[in-house]
Image (cartoon, grey):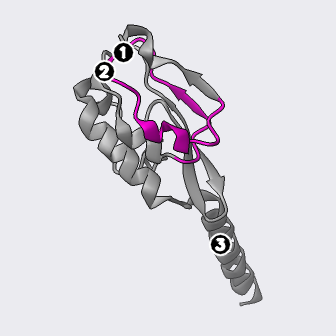
Amino acid sequence: MARLHSVFILILSLSLIQGLFVHSKTLKRDVKALNEIKASLGWRVVYAWVGDDPCGDGDLPPWSGVTCSTQGDYRVVTELEVYAVSIVGPFPTAVTNLLDLTRLDLHNNKLTGPLPSQIGHLKRLKIYYNPLLVYSC
């Protein structure tokens, strides 16, 4: 009986420890922004972005080109690298809602128009590969 009790305590302890490391929720603001970007990009990127959570959810891995970090109880998007996939159209404004972004790479796409003024909201952005190589500003 004591042995059965010990096994039960061990299993319960392992379950609690696993729960601490496996699941943290992605910040809703980042999930919303990436899903808006996903909707605007078209099939070239969307086929690799499965599930609703860009940082991965349960059995699904993070979306290709998306890197997340844990901050407190949440995961946040810190890097977005979606380059050379023939994205056509205006710069995706939803990128400016990824406030923890430190790296942004959208080069070798066919983006048009000006950068949104809200790009200045990305105070943590350190590495930015200019997608404007095909812009005529």
Mark found first going from the N terminus, 1 or 2: 2
Q: Is residue 33 left or right of residue 112?
A: right
Residue 50 on image: x %, y %: 33, 41
Mark found first going from the N terminus, 1 or 3: 3
SS for callout 1: loop
| Magenta region | 99-126
Query: Secondary structure of the magenta portion, mostly?
Result: loop
Which residue is disc 3 drawn over?
16
Q: How far, Cα to Cα, is label 1 from label 3?
A: 45 Å
Q: How far, Cα to Cα, is label 1 from label 2?
A: 5 Å
Mark found first going from the N terminus, 3 or 2: 3
Residue 28 on image: x %, y %: 43, 60
Tell whether label 2 touches label 1 (CB within 8 Å): yes
Which residue is disc 1 drawn over?
109
Front-lying residue, 13 or 35: 35
The answer to whether residue 65 is magenta is no
The answer to whether residue 111 is magenta is yes
Q: Amino acid at mark 3?
A: Leu
Q: Is residue 116 left or right of residue 78?
A: left
Tell me: residue 31, above or below residue 134: below
